[in-house]
Image (spheres, grey):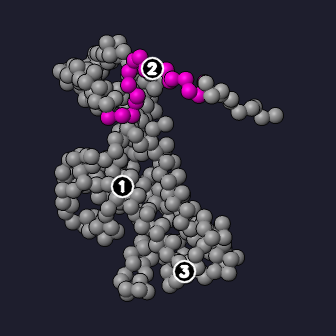
Amino acid sequence: MEAPEPYLTAEEKNLPKARRLRGVAQGTSLSLFLANVAASELDRSLERLGVGFVRYADDTLIWSPDYGRVSEAASILHEASSHIGSPINAEKSLGIRVLAKEETVHVEMSSTKHVDYLGHRIGMRQVRMKDRSVIRIRERIAELIYTNLIQEPLNGSQAGSRLGGVDRDYVTLIWQLRRYLYGSLTENDVRRFQRGAIPPMSFEGVMSFFPLVNGEAQLRELDEWIAAHIWLGLRKRAHLLKAGGLATPLPHGLEKAQLLGFTATSSRTGDLIDLRVPSVRKIARVIQTAVMTHGLGVVSGRPPLYLYGEE
């Protein structure tokens, strides 16, 4: 037997909410500003100590080749935590560890092969996206595939007028996917930047959250996943369209390899429609090159990295 729904009387519904007596709501610009003010002395202390560190709000990562300095930095961090009133999370903070190479077997003290920080997984040789970040990207892309290719024919509401020389719902999918991955850039923009100089500009799209990612195998695997799921989505769509007595225009019937480089011609204007499948590897390389050339300012102004890929 299911539990009954909670019941509130009219009087209970109108009761005033409890007043906040301490702190401000997290996730606001004010909370981030106040966190930076409160931790400013921590930053100065770490700078004077000479260790490397990065901090977003109260989330801090410290590193140094000198064990003595790292130990002193840990003491400074605990003192700051007590002074600010923000306790250190023992479950997330595993203490001082050696960052070791993947092939390292024996280490003299507690070690790790990677460190997770703000949606990134940082190792000795490469920076990857955290698994959770990749899952969120896949979920969003799967949602785009479903809403554009599957939902309407599955519900029996597919408009036949969108099935002319080229499946216009597929065109919409590619445009939305490109916008999600590339921001305002076109496929030609990305390929041109791969070949030549990249001007100072502000990058958008989901990959601007990961400007330093260089894990080639992970990016290649994600590209392959995208291509495979678009192709599978088209197969499912074709089955549903045929069942409803509707046409299956291009790109239906193409093999996956053909789909990657697919272009079409507009029946109304005669213009070329670029429907090549967007690539996370390509845009990641472009953004990484832009960062090395112009600095991290090319991705400044985007929504904070802290808000992406976190639980």
Q: CA distance from mark 2 to mark 1?
A: 39 Å
Location of residue 187 in the rendering, given as x and y in whole percent from the top left corner = 34, 68
Query: How far apart are labels 2 and 3 at the CA level?
Result: 56 Å
Residue position marked by numbered label 2 in the rendering: 19
| Stretch of the chain drawn in magenta | 12-29
Q: Which residue lies at the image location 44% right of the left edge and 76% below the top edge?
A: 262
Give the position of the N terminus as an image quadrant. Answer: top right
* Direction from residue 1 to residue 39 in the image, left or right: left
Q: Position of residue 263 (x, y in %)?
A: 42, 78
Query: Which tag, 2 or 3, sits closer to the chain's start?
Result: 2
Residue depth check, mark 2 versus mark 3: number of the one nearer the observer? 2
Q: Secondary structure at mark 2?
A: loop
**Between disc 2 and disc 1, whose residue precedes?**
2
Element at badge 1?
loop
Looking at the image, which residue is at 35% across and 26% down?
58
Q: Which SS class for mark 3?
A: helix
> Is 250 situated above or below 52?
below
